[in-house]
Image (spheres, rainbow, N blue to C red):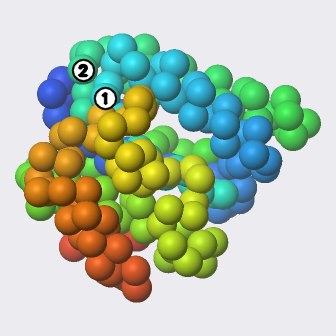
Amino acid sequence: MPNRIVPIEVDSIYHIYNRGVNKELIFFSERNYQFFIYKMVNYMQDNASILAYCLMPNHYHLLVKIKNADFVQKGLQPFLISFTNSINIDQKRIGPLFQGRYQANLVFDDAYLLECVKYIHLNPVKAGLVKLLQEWGYSSYRDYLSPQSKSFVDKESVLTHFDSIFDFKNFSESELTYTNPKYFIDYL
């Protein structure tokens, strides 16, 4: 495979995403979403900090800070292969689940970081799956609303940019009709 245009480097933050082949589903049941989260935590915990995530019926978004130079080989790649194999068995299907190689955008400053977190959390509202961010059970947004609760999400890296949870909530929900991300192309 050709080298990635954006190299994955330790201590850098990346928005990683991909969708199903031909924009088809990658999650078929509640159990699939839960399995993805379980595997994500299992494979990522030693390799990256998860700053935000959102799982949509036909795609996913992860915002991660890389901890290990072998993140792709020891974390992301085996995680996505494991999930694909599980879905293929569960759905009695064969072949690739995802549309090509995952996408990875370097988060190069704090403004991009905050916009990316907002964008990731707004996905289910934009798609019309829910009216309020906290209604979607497959994202890190609820974790952010309960900063004292134990979670695998590294909320501190984002929450340090806000004076309170109330400010974070206002920022996140200020553009529920948000349609044009400044730093990247919408992936729906």
Badges 2 and 1: C-beta atoms under 8 Å apart? yes
- Taking the spot 49% from the left edge, 25% from the top edge, the residue there is 41
Residue 128 drawn at (x, y percent) = 60, 78
Q: Secondary structure at mark 1?
A: strand
**On the image, numbered disc 2 is attached to which residue?**
67
Q: Is residue 73 above or below residue 13?
A: above
Residue bearing mark 1? 49
Question: Left or right: 48 with respect to 42?
Answer: left
> Could you tell me which quadrant the N terminus lies in?
top left
| Residue at 59% over, 53% down | 137
Label 2: few (<14), some or many (≥20) within 10 Å? some
Residue 166 visible in the displayed image? yes
Disc 2 marks which amino acid? Answer: Lys
Q: CA distance from mark 2 to mark 1?
A: 7 Å
Q: Residue at x 55, y 77 (%)?
A: 131
Classify 137 as above or below 71.
Answer: below
Query: SS of the residue at dot 2?
Result: loop
Relative depth, front residue between 188 and 172: 172
Q: Earlier in the sequence, mark 2 or mark 1?
A: 1
Q: Decide if residue 14 is on the left or right side of residue 9.
A: right
Q: Nearer the viewer, mark 2 or mark 1?
A: 1
In the rendered image, the residue lying farthest to the bottom is 177
Q: Crowding near pointer 1: few (<14 within 10 Å), some, many (20+)?
A: many
Identify the residue at image location x=64%, y=52%.
20
Q: Position of residue 22 (x, y in %)?
A: 67, 60
